[in-house]
Image (spheres, helix red, strand yellow):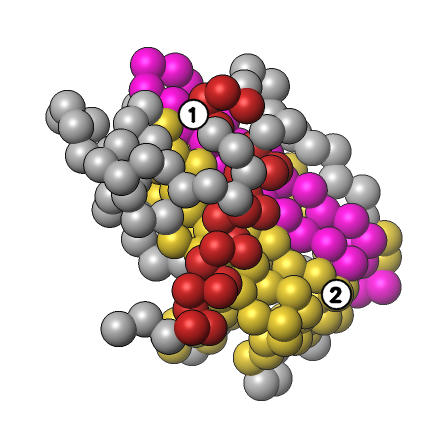
Amino acid sequence: MRSRAQSFWKVIGVAGALAALAAWPGISQAQLGLPGIPPLPGGGSSGTQTLTGQASAVTAVVLGTVTSLADSGTLVDAADPLGTGQPLGSIPGLLSAEALHAATMGWSDQVASEASLGNLSMTVAGIGITATTIISRALAVSGAAPTGLSNIEGLTIGGVSVSPTGLPNQAVSIAGLNVVLNEQVQSASGIVVNALHVTDPLGLTDVVIGAAKAGI
């Protein structure tokens, strides 16, 4: 049986992602339903559509060890939206952050996922990275090309302020780190959006901050 805490974060995550989706171009309130109200039971079970969705605030691979913070899990049914979050999160020796959140949900004809966190403080290969806000969103609608976006505010790398352009796959190289902002990987049926993707020169550390996946 799910704990009360899990249920609480699921409702909060779904409501937050629904509210964000309401502002997306081309997505109406009628399509979304009222903010905070999950899709109707069985919405994703009819027809032959296959829903895929997942979101995570942090996924890090350090020396082959994978650690995730605020991971929604994998969406399998529109009747069961997934959401999770935690006020504080950390990976010792690598990063800390606040207000970590992840949610994914589906309807009969679309899937939406969102991940976010605040006050990121991270050190990769001795280089400090900070950001005040990081958000990623992914949307897949049946019969249309999947879309995604991310927002990063207050980003600094090695003490240097970095301004995201908003364009997909913005590459930044500072102090030897390989950094991609608003990384987007598209396929015929879906999209993965990574707000911030950092790897060290030797490939020993690979960190994705704000990952959202949606497919249908």
Instruction: Give the residue displayed 85% in from the left and 57% down from the top.
Output: 160
Q: Quadrant of the C terminus?
A: top left
Q: Measured along the vertical axis of the image, is residue 78 above or below residue 91?
A: above
Q: In this view, does 144 lie to the left or right of 9?
A: left
Q: Nearer the viewer, residue 27 or 136?
A: 27
Kindly report the distance in space between the C-alpha atoms of the residues bearing marks 2 and 1: 29 Å
Please name the residue that numbered disc 2 is placed on.
119
Q: Nearer the viewer, residue 162 or 1?
A: 1
- Magenta residue check for 156: yes
Residue 208: in sight, yes or no? no
Instruction: Give the residue displayed 30% in from the left and 49% down from the top.
Output: 80
Q: Nearer the viewer, residue 2 or 160?
A: 2
Which image quadrant is residue 129 in? bottom right
**Hey, what amino acid is under mark 1?**
Pro
Residue 14: x and y, percent? 49, 48
Residue 97: x and y, percent? 66, 70
Q: In this view, does 180 lie to the left or right of 4?
A: right
Please name the residue that numbered disc 1 is placed on.
146
Q: In this view, does 171 lie to the left or right of 175?
A: left
Which image quadrant is residue 28 in? top right
Which label belongs to residue 105?
none
Q: Is residue 130 left or right of residue 135?
A: right
Q: Residues within 10 Å of mark 2 (few under 14, many from 20)?
A: some
Q: Nearer the viewer, residue 115 or 34?
A: 34
- Magenta residue check for 74: no
Instruction: Give the residue displayed 69% in from the left and 33% down from the top.
Output: 166
Residue 69: x and y, percent? 49, 69
Residue contact between numbered discs 2 and 1, judged by CB atoms under 8 Å: no
**Hey, what amino acid is under mark 2?**
Asn
Specify the segment rendered in magenta: 132-159
Q: Measured along the vertical axis of the image, is residue 68 above or below residue 91?
A: above
